[in-house]
């Protein structure tokens, strides 16, 4: 009989996790989605519940988990600054204790484990674009540190479990990702601008708007995560996954206004502390080792994202 792999996705009811669960089910796998519903929502995976190969479990990864699996995608962690700063101690616990528990699980079951790390490990980068060799410029005691340092410590744990216990690890450094199923109150820039534009409210640019980010559409990102998981065992990473197309927040705001046909104006708000000035992935490694690069241009990804938020806003009324 054909062997059906059992795959655990932590944070599977979140934005990226829900698309990953969907794609994994399409490959014929059994998917166990574990989530504490801090920022994730049941509605993100509601359409998967009728699939007999899908299972949804409420669980917090800071507590041990005993299940039998072949692969683990560790995505559990709030990703938006307003959410990860809401309870910063819990954010660090989720990254660090969560990594220890999932690595302990991988060690016992001999499963492959992939960590959803982040471009935030580069902090406010002094090198542009950022290659994986760059060690970063991170404030250890600021308001973003619970997330940045938590994720850096998780990477350390992954490499130590690999060296010390021979756990099969994969580390992906994910750059800003957007798409449908982002929470409307998520607080990240793409969701904020679209929700504001659709309601003809002012678009809030933090600072002067010259800071840059590089935005990857969620389907491209999920494809990169799955390629990394299924790459040869010796490829541990870290591997940058992101779209090199770089935009200033002013450019993004104008594009969103234009595409939504909104009458919104742009207003400026104070720049949050430690906000990185610029960010762009160097994806040479992903191109070479995974044969991966993003295929969805910003406008093509914004279109379905705008449609998603349009229906979300209608449902609110
Ligand atoms: P998200 O907030 O939508 O998803 C995170 C999920 O993790 C949510 O479903 C949340 O309920 C769950 N979660 C949080 N703490 C948990 C805990 N202690 N136990 C169990 N579940 C918990 O965010 P996302 O954008 O889908 O991000 C997914 C992963 O990718 C995160 O690890 C994030 O750090 C990483 N990442 C995302 C981006 C991005 O731009 N979206 C960029 C870099 C890294
Ligand atoms: N762990 C888990 N599920 C497992 C195996 C381990 O959640 O199937 C947790 C366990 O509770 C421990 C952590 O993972 O706290 C690290 O496990 P490891 O074996 O490395 O450490 P030890 O149990 O020796 O402290
Ligand atoms: N930002 C903004 N207006 C908003 C939300 C965010 O100008 O309403 C800015 C934010 O200061 C940052 C950039 O957009 O410079 C990206 O912010 P986001 O929170 O999406 O991601 P991160 O800073 O974690 O990359």
Image (cartoon, rainbow, N blue to C red):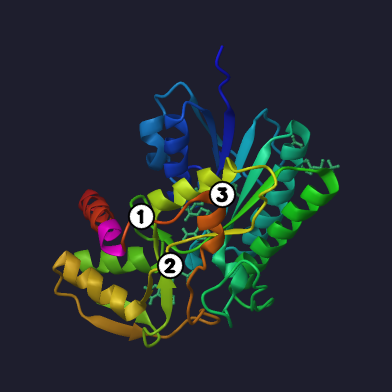
Q: Can you see residue 11?
A: no
Q: CA distance from mark 2 to mark 1?
A: 11 Å
Residue appearing at x 22%, y 50% in the figure:
311
Q: Where is residue 178 drawn, in percent x and y?
A: 38, 58
Q: Residue furthest right?
A: 164
Q: Which residue is mark 2?
A: 244
Q: Where is residue 19 drawn, in percent x and y?
A: 42, 43
The one nearer the camera, 71 or 105, is 71
For residue 160, what is the image quadrant?
A: bottom right
For residue 138, what is the image quadrant?
A: bottom right
Q: Give the vertical position of 11 relative to 198 (above or below).
A: above
The one nearer the camera, 262 or 254, is 254
Q: Which residue is mark 1?
A: 295
| The residue at label 3 has a CB less than 8 Å from ligand 1 | yes
Q: Can you see residue 21?
A: yes
Q: Give the vertical position of 293 relative to 68 (above or below).
A: below
Q: Residue furthest top?
A: 1
Q: Where is residue 267 drawn, in percent x and y?
A: 28, 83
The one nearer the camera, 49 or 1, is 1
Predominant SS of the magenta segment: helix
Could you say which disc has been placed on residue 75 in the image?
Answer: 3
Point out the stretch of residues depicted in magenta: 298-302
In this image, 185 relative to 273: left or right? left
Q: Give the vertical position of 243 relative to 164 (above or below).
A: below
Q: CA distance from mark 2 to mark 3?
A: 22 Å
Label 3 or label 1, whichever comes before in sequence order: 3
Magenta span contains residue 299: yes
SS assignment at label 1? loop
Q: Give the vertical position of 291 relative to 210 (above or below).
A: above
């Amino acid at each position: 009989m054909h062997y059906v792999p059992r795959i655990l996705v932590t944070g599977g009811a979140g934005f990226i996790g829900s698309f990953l669960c969907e794609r994994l089910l399409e490959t014929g796998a059994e998917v166990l989605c574990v989530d504490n519903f801090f920022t994730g929502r049941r509605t993100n995976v509601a359409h998967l519940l009728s699939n007999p190969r899908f299972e949804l479990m409420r669980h917090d990864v800071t507590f041990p988990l005993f299940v039998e699996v072949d692969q683990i995608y560790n995505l559990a962690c709030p990703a938006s600054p307003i959410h990860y700063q809401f309870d910063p101690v819990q954010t660090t616990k989720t990254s660090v204790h969560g990594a220890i528990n999932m690595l302990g699980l991988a060690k016992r079951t001999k499963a492959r484990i992939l960590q959803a790390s982040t471009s935030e490990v580069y902090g406010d980068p002094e090198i542009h674009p950022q290659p994986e060799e760059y060690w970063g410029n991170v404030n250890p005691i600021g308001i973003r540190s619970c997330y940045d340092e938590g994720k850096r410590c998780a990477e350390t744990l992954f490499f130590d479990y690999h060296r010390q216990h021979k756990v099969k690890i994969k580390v992906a450094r994910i750059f800003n990702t957007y798409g449908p199923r982002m929470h409307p109150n998520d607080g990240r820039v793409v969701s904020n601008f679209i929700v504001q534009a659709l309601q003809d409210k002012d678009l809030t640019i933090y600072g002067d708007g010259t800071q840059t980010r590089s935005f990857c559409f969620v389907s491209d990102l999920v494809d990169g995560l799955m390629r990394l998981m299924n790459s040869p065992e010796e490829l541990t990473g870290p591997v940058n996954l992101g779209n090199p197309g770089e935009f200033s927040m002013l450019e993004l705001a104008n594009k969103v206004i234009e595409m939504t046909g909104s009458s919104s104006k742009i207003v400026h708000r104070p720049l949050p502390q430690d906000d990185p000035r610029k960010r762009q992935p160097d994806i040479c490694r992903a191109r070479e080792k995974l044969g991966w690069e993003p295929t969805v241009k910003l406008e093509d990804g914004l279109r379905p994202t705008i449609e998603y938020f349009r229906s979300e806003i209608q449902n609110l009324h």
